[in-house]
Amino acid sequence: MVNNLVGGIIPPQPPVESQSDVHTLKSRLEWGEPAFTILDVRDRNTFNEGHILGAMPMPIDELVQRAVPSLDKSRDIYVYGANEEESAQAAQQLRSNGFEHVSQLKGGLAAWKAIGGPTEGIVESKTPPGADDYNVVDRLKTHQETLPKGGPTATEAIKKGASDFKDNIQEGASNLKEGIQEGVNNVKEGISESNAPKGNDDSNIGS
């Protein structure tokens, strides 16, 4: 593939296979690889309910007439349908009409969701996010998995860290307050001493 627009930053991808595993597509998405298109050839209502994040809706009965004028024929295209048969049929239609780099996404949306791939749509928006939809969740999970058995949970560790931070702030504030009070007292004592009577030392001279 020669259509890597960010050469030297994103690792070059090999030419797409006639069939691709969902892990391959997810890897490209995570790298931010721009030079490919995902086509969902299911009917529009099904697409609206839920689809792979960023996929374009092109129902199979309109696929060729919509794809030919709108997509570059040298672009990498991943296509999936309601089942493997529909996906294969869509991929073949595209290849027959001059598209050079077409790959059938094995397993379609179900396989994509099984590995935690990001989705969008009416139904998907009501579904709790997967483990790696948000990096912070993924990091906490990884942290928890690497803790020794019997150690604190990720939530407990966060709470303890916050509590320790709060205690440190309170202790610092208390010490500052004591220091200020001590300084004020010292100033008061100094003023009192400077204003105090000298005593009878002068009257005792020569006595």
Image (cartoon, grey):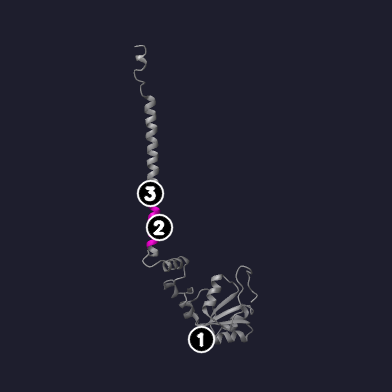
Can you say whether 110 is above or below 171 in the image? Answer: below
Q: Which callout, 1 or 2, points to the residue nearer the camera?
A: 2
Of helix, strand and loop, which one carries label 2?
A: helix
Of helix, strand and loop, which one carries label 1?
A: helix
Q: Is residue 65 in view from this perspective? A: yes
Q: Quadrant of residue 66?
A: bottom right
- Counting residues from the N terminus, which is met first, the one under dot 1 or under dot 3? 1
- Counting residues from the N terminus, which is met first, the one under dot 1 or under dot 2? 1
Question: Residue 67 appears at what percent x and percent y?
Answer: 60, 80
- Counting residues from the N terminus, which is met first, the one under dot 2 or under dot 3? 2
The amino acid at mark 1 is Glu
> On the picture, is 29 further left or further right than 200?
right
Q: Is residue 55 in view from this perspective? A: no
- Residue matched to label 2: 161
Q: Magenta part of the protein: which range?
A: 156-168
Question: Residue 114 appears at what percent x and percent y?
Answer: 46, 78
Q: Quick one: quadrant of the C terminus?
A: top left
Q: Check disc 2: other Cα within 10 Å, few if <14, some if 14-19, many if 20+.
A: few
- Residue matched to label 1: 84
